[in-house]
Amino acid sequence: MIYVGKSSLPKAGKGLFTTIPIKKGEVVCEYEGERITWAEATRRNDKDKGGYVFYLTKKNCVDAYDAVDTFGRYANDAAGLSRVKGTRNNSIYEIRKNKVYIVATKNIKAGSEIFVSYGKQYWKVMKEELELREKEEKKKKKKKEKNKTPKGKKDKKSDRKTKKDKTSKGERSGKKAA
């Protein structure tokens, strides 16, 4: 029996676990979701609805983004961006008759988390997207700071300081200034 719980990997969210021992070579579960094309997967990813696609062919991918009631989407990669020393993948993805399964690569003890490799290409793309988002956030922050009136600068409409500069920090937060 498998179930979803809090992952042992930092910042990974939920993870997939087993209540019974699973033997090497046994199917843990099927990776289920909507069948879509790679072009559709790319469109969804651009709308921040990606990350759960298993690529079979250009015309056949499994998208588990909205398949929250299935188990396969919750298996994490122990070799991903947030690692725990000593934690290793214990399963692989296997395609059988056009279906995707998670299969144990070693004996897995009851109570263990199921870990499966997403592949180097997946993590390369994820890292690039993360760096791009961080770059965009820095740009937004820089633009926001540029648009603020600098402290001590006189208001253009009048010859006095802005209200923000006249009020002490303690007064703005609702505390009396000493």
Image (spheres, helix red, strand yellow):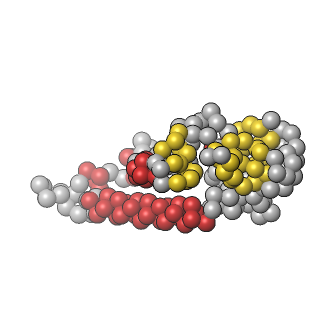
Instruction: Residue at the far left: name it.
Output: 157
Left/right of residue 65 with respect to residue 134 in the rendered view: right
Residue drawn at point x = 61 percent, y = 66 percent: 120
Residue drawn at point x = 86 percent, y = 39 percent: 20
Residue 35 visible in the current orientation? yes
Residue drawn at point x = 75 percent, y = 58 percent: 89
Left/right of residue 26 with respect to residue 115 in the rendered view: right
Instruction: Residue at the far front: name it.
Output: 97
Residue 144 at x, y percent in the picture: 32, 58
Nearer the observer, 57 or 5: 57
Residue 145 visible in the current orientation? no
Instruction: Residue at the far top: name it.
Output: 69
Residue 115 at x, y percent in the picture: 73, 53
Nearer the observer, 122 or 178: 122
* Whether residue 38 is situated above or below residue 124 in the rendered picture: above
Left/right of residue 154 with respect to residue 72 in the rendered view: left
Quadrant where the N terminus sits is top right
Residue drawn at point x = 38 percent, y = 46 percent: 172
How many labels, in total? 0
Residue 105 at x, y percent in the picture: 80, 56
Nearer the observer, 108 or 161: 108
Residue 128 at x, y percent in the picture: 49, 65
